[in-house]
């Protein structure tokens, strides 16, 4: 019985390793401290050199705010957009609009809006929806996308990141994987039958 459990565990481990070996994870972030302080007098464009590895597609994408915090505990808003393009790095744009106005309204697509941000540091993550990923794929054809951030108050963080996971475009198992899987499963079945006898 112990041998059977060991073999099953080994096979499951091999499949897990093979699946994870095919996935690629990339993390994008602006220059150090570039978006750590978001002043309400500005809107911010973050240009990201975003290249999709050849033969792969995006399986998931998150934008992460590390220790994000509001300057007070009042109701304040941060608008976050995906833009078709932006100059490399972070660009500050003077924003003279008052109140809850989205500087990037009508530009790109709105990813999400944060409301009621606490002054207590928090880790905030937004996972791109399927529609947002489709738009990103179109925007990233030239290897560049933009993230637009418009705070209506002052916010701080310890870093803003994009975390992308890519998988091979081919979703069906590769022939070599099937060739290994078939004999392995037959061998396991034969071994289990012999143990029962």
Image (cartoon, rainbow, N blue to C red):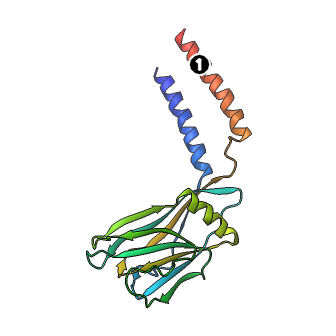
Residue 73: horizontal and vertical position, in percent? 25, 74
**Residue 138 x, y percent position in the rendering:** 66, 66
Residue sitting at x 58%, y 73% = 108
| Image quadrant where residue 183 sits | top right
- Which of 189/67 is in front? 67
- In this view, the residue in front, 171 or 19, is 171
Q: Which residue is mark 1?
A: 191
Residue 25 visible in the shown view: no
From what the image shows, is residue 166 above or below residue 172?
A: below
Residue projecting furthest to the right: 175
Q: Measured along the vertical axis of the image, is residue 56 above or below residue 102?
A: above
Residue 133 image offset from top left, x and y in percent: 58, 61
Res 136 → quadrant: bottom right
Outermost residue toward the top in this view: 197
Q: Residue at x 58, y 39 (%)?
A: 15
Vertical side of 182 occupied by 58: above or below: below
Residue drawn at point x = 39 percent, y = 82 percent: 37
Q: Is residue 143 visible?
A: yes
Count of picture labels? 1
Q: Secondary structure at mark 1?
A: helix
Crowd class of label 1 (few under 14; some 14 to 19; many from 20; radius 10 Å): few
Horizontal relation, residue 112 to residue 19: left or right: left
Residue 156 location, x and y as percent?
36, 78
Residue 38 figure quarter: bottom left
**Point 53% across, 28% down: residue:** 7
Quadrant of the drawing holding the C terminus: top right
């Amino acid at each position: 019985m112990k041998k059977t459990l060991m073999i099953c565990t080994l096979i499951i481990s091999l499949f897990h390793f093979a699946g994870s070996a095919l996935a690629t994870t990339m993390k994008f972030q602006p220059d150090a401290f570039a978006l750590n302080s978001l002043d309400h007098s500005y809107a911010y464009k973050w240009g990201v050199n975003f290249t999709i590895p050849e033969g792969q597609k995006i399986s998931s994408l998150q934008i992460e705010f590390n220790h994000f915090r509001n300057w007070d505990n009042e109701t304040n808003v941060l608008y976050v957009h995906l833009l078709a393009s932006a100059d490399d790095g972070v660009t500050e744009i003077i924003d003279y609009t008052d109140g809850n106005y989205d500087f990037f309204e009508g530009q790109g697509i709105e990813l999400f809006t944060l409301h009621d941000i606490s002054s207590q540091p928090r880790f905030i993550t937004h996972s791109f929806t399927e529609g947002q990923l489709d738009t990103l794929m179109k925007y990233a054809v030239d290897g560049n996308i933009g993230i637009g951030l418009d705070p209506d108050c002052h916010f701080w963080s310890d870093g803003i990141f994009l975390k992308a996971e890519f998988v091979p475009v081919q979703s069906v198992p590769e022939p070599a994987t099937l060739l290994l899987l078939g004999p392995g499963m037959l061998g396991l079945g034969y071994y289990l039958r012999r143990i029962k006898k």
